[in-house]
Image (spheres, rainbow, N blue to C red):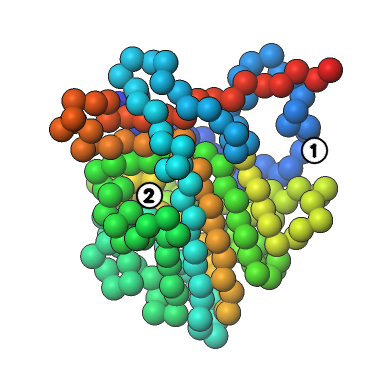
């Protein structure tokens, strides 16, 4: 648990949303394991005290729709303050859902079972939506708020022919009761944010005498021939 907490907090503090696509080929050989998500990871069970993540339980698909006439900022996560709020802390014009289950249930779960996500896919109806900067917040029990900006427009692959889809394998964020992802959504816009779970805590596993921490295996780099 302590290792997971340290990794999650370091990932949040070290994350920079200002890095732009540099054109490097992801297939090039670097001599070490490739830690970024590419959708084909195996599952790691080789370290004592760790469980594997169910291959059918790694994807979180959040769907946000703004039915209003002006831009609204949707808040994902932040269960400590949003779970008991009307519409989970969001404006009445906004609808937030989770394709895999109930968003409200997931929100409640994150208070005791934190997640670490690595890899983001962002689907929008209108490419103008990608110009809206997201914001990641961490609110501590001491009242301090740590904020990090994330600009989707700087992550667009110039080789892509689809301007309404963003894939960022470098995106990393902890999901706990005190972490929030703010997403401005334009009027009439509907977006989908797909996050890939890298590490997850399940406290209920203690009742079965099993490890509470589950992780996914990092994929090794491929050598260029």
Question: What crowding class fits label 2: few (fewer than 14 Cα within 10 Å), some (14-19), or many (20 or more)?
Answer: many
* Residue 85 falls left or right of residue 149: left
Q: Which dot marks residue 13?
A: none
Q: Residue at x 63, y 36 (%)?
A: 38
* Residue 109 falls left or right of residue 63: left
Residue 222 point in image, percent of width and height: 71, 21
* Residue 32 falls left or right of residue 100: right
Callout 2: SS: strand
Closer to the camera in the image, 213 or 19:
213
Q: Which dot marks residue 179?
A: 2
Q: Residue at x 33, y 54 (%)?
A: 106
Task: Tell me the quarter of the image containing the C terminus.
Answer: top right
Q: Which dot marks residue 23?
A: 1
Q: Residue at x 78, y 33 (%)?
A: 24
- Taking the view exactly as shown, the residue that stands out farthest to the bottom is 69
Residue 72 point in image, percent of width and height: 50, 74
Closer to the camera in the image, 203 or 8:
203
Callout 1: SS: loop
Residue 99 visible, this orientation: yes
């Amino acid at each position: 648990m302590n290792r997971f907490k340290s990794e999650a907090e370091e990932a949040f503090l070290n994350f920079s949303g200002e890095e732009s696509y540099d054109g490097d080929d992801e297939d090039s050989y670097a001599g070490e394991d490739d830690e970024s998500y590419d959708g084909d990871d195996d599952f790691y069970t080789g370290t004592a005290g760790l469980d594997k993540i169910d291959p059918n339980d790694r994807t979180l698909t959040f769907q946000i729709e703004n039915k209003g006439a002006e831009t609204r900022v949707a808040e994902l996560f932040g269960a400590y303050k949003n779970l008991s709020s009307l519409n989970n802390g969001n404006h009445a014009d906004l609808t937030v859902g989770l394709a895999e289950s109930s968003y409200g249930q997931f929100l409640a779960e994150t208070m005791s079972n934190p997640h670490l996500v690595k890899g983001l896919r962002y689907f929008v109806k209108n490419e103008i939506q990608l110009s809206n900067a997201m914001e990641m917040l961490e609110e501590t029990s001491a009242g301090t708020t740590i904020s990090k900006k994330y600009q989707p427009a700087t992550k667009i692959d110039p080789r892509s022919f689809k301007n309404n889809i963003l894939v960022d394998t470098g995106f990393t964020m902890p999901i706990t009761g005190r972490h929030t992802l703010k997403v401005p959504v334009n009027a009439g816009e509907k977006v989908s944010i797909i996050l890939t779970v890298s590490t997850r805590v399940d406290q209920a596993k203690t009742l079965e005498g099993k490890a509470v921490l589950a992780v996914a295996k990092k994929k090794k780099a491929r050598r260029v021939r």
